[in-house]
Image: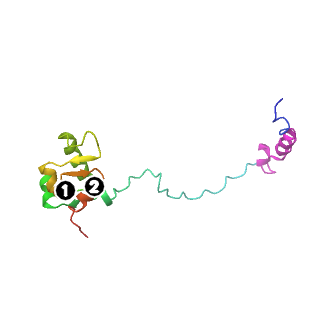
């Protein structure tokens, strides 16, 4: 036996009352038999999130903003300005290309001569230290 049968016992009576109170389509006409004029339309509000107009590109901020770099990082990357995220990507590409990760502990990176120049002369750095060490090479601009 279903437990929902007791729940919907009075449901038909409720629906019948609501159906009787609903206006019929013929009630939309006036007494003279003419249809009602449509309600006045409102001016559409401009939608900011889903408008079809192209948005002007916003300027990158934070780690995506291009900043001038120190001479040591410039020598490593080969560019005068770069974003922090691009600098980290290039360092990781170099690490992977030259197989400088410790095979036993992937969190350790062995520094060769080129990396020692940007990582304060350390022989090994942790992968979480890379961002911190690179932050010293970005020149502050206002």
The residue that disc 2 covers is 129
Write down the quadrant of residue 4 in the picture: top right
Position of 70 compared to 36: left or right?
left
87 vs 43, nearest the viewer? 87
Q: Which mark is residue 60?
A: none
- Residues under numbered marks 2 and 1 in contact, where contact means CB atoms less than 8 Å apart: yes
14 vs 56, nearest the viewer? 14
- Image quadrant in which the C terminus is located: bottom left
Residue numbers of the magenta segment: 9-32
Q: CA distance from mark 2 to mark 1?
A: 9 Å
Q: Secondary structure at mark 1?
A: loop
The residue that disc 1 covers is 119
Mark 2 crowdedness (10 Å alpha carbons): few <14, some 14-19, many ≥20: few
Q: Residue furthest bottom?
A: 142
Is 98 magenta? The answer is no
- Image quadrant in which the N terminus is located: top right
Q: Whole-percent x and y of residue 101?
A: 23, 43
| Residue 60 visible to an observer of this rendering | no
Position of 53 compared to 115: left or right?
right
Position of 64 compared to 74: left or right?
right
């Amino acid at each position: 036996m279903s437990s929902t049968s007791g729940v919907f016992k009075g449901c038909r009576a409720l629906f019948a009352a609501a159906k009787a109170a609903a206006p019929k389509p013929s009630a939309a006409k006036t007494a003279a038999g003419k249809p009602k004029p449509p309600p006045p339309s409102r001016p559409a509000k401009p939608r900011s999130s889903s408008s079809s107009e192209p948005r002007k590109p916003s300027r990158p901020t934070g780690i995506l903003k291009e900043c001038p770099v120190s001479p040591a990082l410039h020598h490593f990357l080969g560019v005068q300005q770069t974003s922090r995220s691009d600098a980290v990507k290039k360092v990781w590409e170099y690490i992977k290309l030259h197989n400088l990760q410790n095979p036993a502990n992937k969190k350790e990176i062995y520094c060769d001569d080129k990396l020692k120049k940007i990582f304060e002369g350390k022989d090994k750095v942790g992968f979480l230290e890379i961002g911190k060490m690179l932050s010293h090479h970005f020149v502050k601009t206002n």
